[in-house]
Amino acid sequence: MLDRADIPSGRVRAIAPEPLPVSAMMRGKPVAEVVDLLPRLFNLCRGAQATALNLALGLEGAGDDMLVQEIRNDHLLRLAIVLPQRLGLDRLAVPFNDPAQLPNALFGAPTLPDNAVEFDDFLRGDSGIAPILRAIRDRFAPGEATCPQLPPVGADMTLNAAENSVAARHLDHPILCHVEAQFGRGPYWRVTARAVDLDALLHGDLPAPRLVAPHTAVVPAARGQYMVRARAEAGRITDLHRITPTDHMLAPGGILEHSLATLPASKHDQAALLVDILDPCVPIRLEGLTDA
């Protein structure tokens, strides 16, 4: 692992690739070409991007079914495959193509428990995702790899340090409040938020895509909310600006910076797990790690 003198002791820095100049790339192109190209330019959240762009341009969108399937599959991939592998656990066998059976496979019940007593009882068992949540809870002590209460993301296309995440859709959920009170807004809170969001999604609860200003759309996505402002004249794009949950996560003073800053040097060996839990949609290189 890396140990660099220009990074303060115990601090880790995340290095992300330079973002593509999407606005410049799309300006002047025919609308139909941009509508086809933008979702294919990025291999994640294609449905969210297509829906937001179409809505901002006043075109017929991809439809809510595509969004629901995209978010559901992303959550399932993370909870059933990626995180168990990172934790050294067996993959969770879930019926990806049978949403009606998913709650029992994930929670051992028709829904995730919605009160602290039942949730803690669930964690003591081995049903569904309970061992995964429990393993993450036990990897990070209270206050480790946490982020303070950042303001919930607004809809004004401002890129700042904000809570643009699936947790932001459920900040008042009793389970998230329970976990936050014990551990803070750390890895355990964020994985629990993904489970809460998936449970809500499986029961038909997902914010609707909406226009928040002329030519400006906000759409739910697998990592938070996706925002697009787009205008066209004479059939060609004149303005296109997008802000993703990862943009907010990587912003100075954002979720990733705070989470890494509060990761103890003794737990730098958990940095890759932390990044997998935060789940940015770009490859992240970590600098300043000590041998842990």
Image: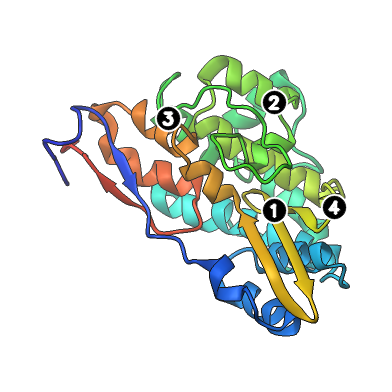
Which label is found at residue 258? Answer: 3
Q: Gap between marks 3 and 2, in whole Å?
A: 23 Å
Up-down relation of residue 84 to residue 141 (above or below): below
| Residue 98 in sight from this viewpoint | no
At x 52% / y 58%, what residue is drawn? Answer: 81
Which label is found at residue 227? Answer: 1
Mark 3 and mark 2 residues within 8 Å of each other at the beta carbon: no
Residue 211 relative to residue 33: left or right:
right
Up-down relation of residue 185 to residue 93 (above or below): above
At x 79% / y 43%, what residue is drawn? Answer: 200
Q: Earlier in the sequence, mark 2 or mark 4?
A: 2
Q: What element carries label 2?
A: helix
Q: Quadrant of residue 48?
A: bottom right
Amino acid identity at mark 2: Ile
Which label is found at residue 59? Answer: none
Q: Mark 2 points at which residue?
A: 175
Q: Mark 4 points at which residue?
A: 211
Amino acid identity at mark 1: Met
Up-down relation of residue 72 to residue 289 (above or below): below
Q: Gap between marks 2 and 4, in whole Å?
A: 30 Å
Q: Which of marks 4 and 1 is nearer the N terminus?
A: 4
Q: Which of marks 4 and 3 is nearer the N terminus?
A: 4
Q: What element carries label 1?
A: strand
Whole-percent x, y for residue 65 in the image: 84, 65
